Image (cartoon, helix red, strand yellow):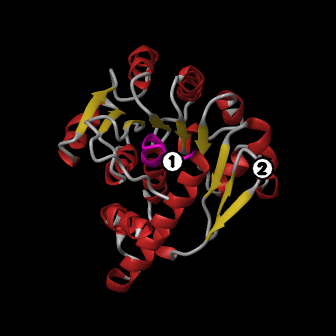
Amino acid sequence: MAVQRASDSHKGDNGKVAIIGGSLHQHGAPIFSALAAESSGVDLIYLALPKIHEIVARMQSLNFQVHPFHGDELQKNDLGPLIEMLATVDCAVIGPGLQRTSNGLGLIRELIESAPCPLVLDASALQEWTLDAAKGKTAVVTPHLGELERMGISPKNIGTAAKKSGVVIHVKAKIDLTAGIDGKIRKTSGGNAGLTVGGTGDALAGLICGLIAQGTPPGEACVTASTVIKRAGTMLFHDFDNAYGTRRVIENIPHVLRSLLQ
């Protein structure tokens, strides 16, 4: 369930998030995550992505504080500033659109291991070593079935893997599965095939991050975010069939979240 904010709260009290993603040929993934985090109601959003995409990122929201990489891919000299930024936020998404070269994956692992804040790990950050890198941290991984296989985890073993690693595992599928660190699994159904469009997974990661930043426990944040995305898809299908796209899903997040609070 989404968190009600205090009426006397101030800027920053209701969540600060960071999104780290993107590569030379992928700019949309981290932007979708940032837009979804914004739609969750967080106060501040720090978006780090390749320098080549800085202008388009700034054009998506006046609330984004954009921190471009030094170049068009994540580099070693980006890690220091990024880790300093992560020390100031309540939760961060790492992975959407990042390059998957051997060098890039090494940098992603170093970033995860050094991150001082709760994490939502998605896309390129989902590797066979991810649970080891995130062990001991407050973290969520959000694989689809192909990424789960890449991580070396069978769907039937996600509860065991989550309990062993202390990392919440949220598997995206027709029926989403959320394995908590207690090993228990919760199922979320709904939605439709329109949600297979590119970007909905990035939006889910951003929404989970935004909810965690506002105080929702990680497992509950996964279930809530999954419910919201699937319900938004159901609502949009009536007007757009399967062609509603990720941006419309994100625009409907506040409406669906509000309905969950009523």
- Rendering coords of residue 209 (x, y %): 46, 44
Q: Residue at x 20, y 37 (%)?
A: 55
Residue 126 drawn above or below residue 208: above
Residue depicted at 68% across the width and 62% down the height: 186
- Please determine whether, in this image, residue 166 is positioned above or below residue 114: below
Quarter of the view holding residue 122: top right
Q: Residue 211: where, in percent of width, then height? A: 45, 48
Q: Secondary structure at mark 2?
A: loop
Q: Is residue 27 above or below residue 240?
A: above
Which residue position holds label 2? 183
149 in relation to 248, above or below: above
Where residue 167 appears, as percent x and y from the top left, is 68, 40
Q: In the rendered view, does 184 fall on the left or right side of 251?
A: right
Which range is magenta? 210-217
> Residue 69 in magenta?
no
**Which residue is at 39% across, 24% downward?**
88
Q: Nearer the viewer, residue 118 or 248?
A: 118
Task: Give the farthest residue toward the front.
Answer: 8
Where is residue 220 shown, x and y percent of the image? 58, 54
Residue topped by disc 1:
216
The kind of residue on which mark 1 rests is Thr
Query: How busy is the neighbourhood of tag 2: few (under 14 within 10 Å), some, or many (20 plus)?
Result: many
Front-most of residues 187 and 147: 187
- Closer to the chain start, of discs 1 and 2, is 2
* Residue plotted at (47% across, 55% down): 204
In the drawing, does residue 240 fall left or right of residue 1?
A: left
What distance separates the C-alpha of mark 1 from that of mark 2? Answer: 19 Å
Question: Label 1: few (<14), some or many (≥20) within 10 Å?
Answer: some
